[in-house]
Image (spheres, coloured by chain):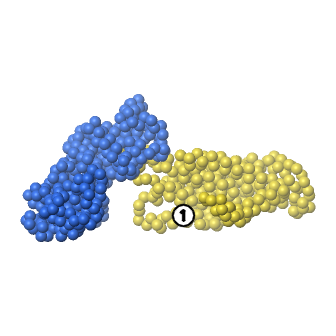
């Protein structure tokens, strides 16, 4: 981009993509903002005009708002903790030379290619079903009473299902990061008298910090919006109603588009707070 | 103390034997250089001594104690890697302190040793920076600093200067030599650069395909190379190796004569040829001479102030007592 001509040519050529992306984002955003200030009940009279901030006040003061926020945070942090901890361990394991490495790596990545709805249904019916599920059989084999996972331990169950889906992603990113670690650094540490555990904490983990922040950032953005896993398993019951699920219920089950839109605006604000927070961490990490 | 002894050491990777049985003794305080072309097994040999690779058969003794199965950290050796292998997320101070911290030394002693090393290597100005903010030469010093704080029995250097530019390389070469004089610790230094070997070593070990071709002081190797490989490898520019009729005159299969042992004469020389490329360095001139009937090219070192150029006829007279003679197997005669 040296000359003025090439710079304006570049702008011209980027314009269609930029305009398309901007439109894609701006139209739904504007519509959400528009509806959030109106009373809009599709089955009970349709669009009934402006209401000011009523929808916003009602959404926050509703008794299900704070539980939804806390459920969202519990699920997000739970999944992040599990995927990153197991992801680091799996990445280290997969980095070791072994027989059938290629096949094993593909198998590890496989869950990521299963649609969320499908994998949640598989977990619900094949593993967690209290009468016919594999877990139920396992529990009975050891003489214990089967647990009805999705009603008695609903949130942990959902964390488990979502972690299973996202573990491959974390593993993949962390594996590529581990492969870029200079083996001479590990050898130097070995000669310096560092035990395997010390080598992990002083060399490998700091080397992975950047990749871990990237996993953290990307996963958080996607995990704030998980929906299918809840929809097909608990349907938001047993304390698994997250913020995005609450919005869905307000719009479709209560048929209140104005209230749901106000919730959507809160969700945008929450996601942006998280994003800014994480961008700062990433920015700090990428500097050094 | 740091006497290192290799006894019948071999190393195989799968079915490939990269180091056939090898014996070598490195005396305490000696600066030993392993030199040889790429892939000759010199780095592997160093890694065997360090313990980063397991030896297939044989024994390694350090100070008379069997160290064959001892883990790297317990061998009391410190290594400087080609890539320096500094820890990028630690400051220079923490990098240097790392081996001491791993040895669970108390903080006051760590600080004292790190400061002493920083003093010796002039690191004080950038002790709180990270490796990413340092130049190649500074990183090299930090890597050496990390090695010396451990007060090891011997230092191992794996081509430490190959990532530096030419001017810096000469400077660091001197610094490492001075460090060796100051510490008087055993040092083993791996390089493919015979100039580094000649300038720094007390003892040079010339390796080819895992086999030791010759061991000796730099001048021994220069004066009496044991075979044609060593003859061609040590010395710059390379020794001229001549076979055929001219060699038969000296009762040898091959004769060798160094460029600096051939005199340029006005006329009536033993040999004559046409000048190809003439490299004028100021202090010296190197001529590459063709059409001598002896070899494809003959390299000759002459004085700097000489006016022969491309295409001129040149008369040469080798110094008879500087001719090296080799038999058909490439081994030295006499």
Q: How many marks?
A: 1
Residue nearer the viewer, B285 or B329: B285
**Image quarter in which the C terminus of chain B is found:** bottom left
**How busy is the neighbourhood of tag 1: few (under 14 within 10 Å), some, or many (20 plus)?**
some
Is A102 placed above or below A201 here? below
Residue A166 lies, in percent from the top left, at: 59, 58
Determine the residue positioned at 76% across, 50% down: A266
Residue nearer the viewer, A43 or B31: B31
Viewed as shown, does residue A234 lie left or right of B114? Answer: right
In the rendering, what colour is chain A? yellow
Determine the residue positioned at 25% across, 63% down: B288
Image quarter of residue B233: bottom left
Residue nearer the viewer, B87 or A157: B87
**Visible residue check, residue A100:** yes
Viewed as shown, does residue B308 lie left or right of B334? Answer: right
Determine the residue positioned at 65% across, 46% down: A277
**Image quarter in which the N terminus of chain B is found:** top left
Residue B150 lies, in percent from the top left, at: 34, 38
Determine the residue positioned at 50% across, 47% down: A206
Kindly identify which chain the residue marked by label 1 belongs to. Answer: A
The residue beneath circle 1 is A109
Residue B297 lies, in percent from the top left, at: 23, 66
Is A281 placed above or below B19 here? above
Residue nearer the viewer, A222 or B327: B327
Residue B30 lies, in percent from the top left, at: 22, 43
Is A17 placed above or below A76 here? below
The chain shown in blue is which? B
């Amino acid at each position: 981009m040296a000359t003025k001509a090439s710079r304006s040519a570049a702008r011209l050529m980027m314009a269609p993509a930029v305009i398309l992306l901007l439109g894609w984002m701006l139209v739904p955003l504007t519509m959400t903002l528009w509806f959030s200030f109106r009373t809009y009940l599709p089955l009970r009279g349709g669009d009934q005009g402006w209401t000011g901030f009523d929808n916003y006040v009602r959404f926050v003061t509703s008794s299900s708002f704070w539980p939804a926020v806390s459920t969202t945070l519990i699920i997000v942090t739970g999944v992040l903790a599990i995927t990153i901890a197991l992801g680091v361990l799996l990445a280290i394991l997969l980095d070791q030379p072994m027989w059938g490495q290629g096949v094993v790596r593909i198998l590890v990545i496989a869950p990521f290619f299963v649609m969320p709805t499908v994998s949640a249904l598989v977990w619900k019916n094949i593993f967690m079903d209290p009468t016919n599920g594999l877990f139920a059989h396992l529990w009975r084999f050891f003489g214990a009473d089967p647990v009805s996972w999705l009603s008695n331990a609903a949130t942990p169950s959902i964390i488990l299902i979502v972690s299973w889906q996202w573990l491959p992603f974390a593993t993949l990113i962390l594996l590529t990061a581990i492969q870029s670690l200079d083996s001479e650094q590990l050898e130097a540490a070995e000669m310096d008298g560092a035990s395997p555990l010390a080598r992990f904490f002083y060399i490998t983990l700091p080397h992975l910090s950047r990749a871990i922040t990237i996993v953290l950032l990307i996963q958080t953005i996607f995990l704030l919006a998980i929906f299918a896993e809840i929809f097909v398993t608990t349907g938001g019951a047993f304390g698994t109603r997250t913020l995005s699920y609450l919005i869905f219920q307000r719009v479709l089950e209560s048929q209140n588009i104005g209230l749901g839109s106000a919730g959507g605006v809160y969700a945008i604000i929450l996601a942006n707070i998280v994003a800014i927070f994480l961008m700062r961490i990433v920015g700090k990490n990428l500097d050094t | 103390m740091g006497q290192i002894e290799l006894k019948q050491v071999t190393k195989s990777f799968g079915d490939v034997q990269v180091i056939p049985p090898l014996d070598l003794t490195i005396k305490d305080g000696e600066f030993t250089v392993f030199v040889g072309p790429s892939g000759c097994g010199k780095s592997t040999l160093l890694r065997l001594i360090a313990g980063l690779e397991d030896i297939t058969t044989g024994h390694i003794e350090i100070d008379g104690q069997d160290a064959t199965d001892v883990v790297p950290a317990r061998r009391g050796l410190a290594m400087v890697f080609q890539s320096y292998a500094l820890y990028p997320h630690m400051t220079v101070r923490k990098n240097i302190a790392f081996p001491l911290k791993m040895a669970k030394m108390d903080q006051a002693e760590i600080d004292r040793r790190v400061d002493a090393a920083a003093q010796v290597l002039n690191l004080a100005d950038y002790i709180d920076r990270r490796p990413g903010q340092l130049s190649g030469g500074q990183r090299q010093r930090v890597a050496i600093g990390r090695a010396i704080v451990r007060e090891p029995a011997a230092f191992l250097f794996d081509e430490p200067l190959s990532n530096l530019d030419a001017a810096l390389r000469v400077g660091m070469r001197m610094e490492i030599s001075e460090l060796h004089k100051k510490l008087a610790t055993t040092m083993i230094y791996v390089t493919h650069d015979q100039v580094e070997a000649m300038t720094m070593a007390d003892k040079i070990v010339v390796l080819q395909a895992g086999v030791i071709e010759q061991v000796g002081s730099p001048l021994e190797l220069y004066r009496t190379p044991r075979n044609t490989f060593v003859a061609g490898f040590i010395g710059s520019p390379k020794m001229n190796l001549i076979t055929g009729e001219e060699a038969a005159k000296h009762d040898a299969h091959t004769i060798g004569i160094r460029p600096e042992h051939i005199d340029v004469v006005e006329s009536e020389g033993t040999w004559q040829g046409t000048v190809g490329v003439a490299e004028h360095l100021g202090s010296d001139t190197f001529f590459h001479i063709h059409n001598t009937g002896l070899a494809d090219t003959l390299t000759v070192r002459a004085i700097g102030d000489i006016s022969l150029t491309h295409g001129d006829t040149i008369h040469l007279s080798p110094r008879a007592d500087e001719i090296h003679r080799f038999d058909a197997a490439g081994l030295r005669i006499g």
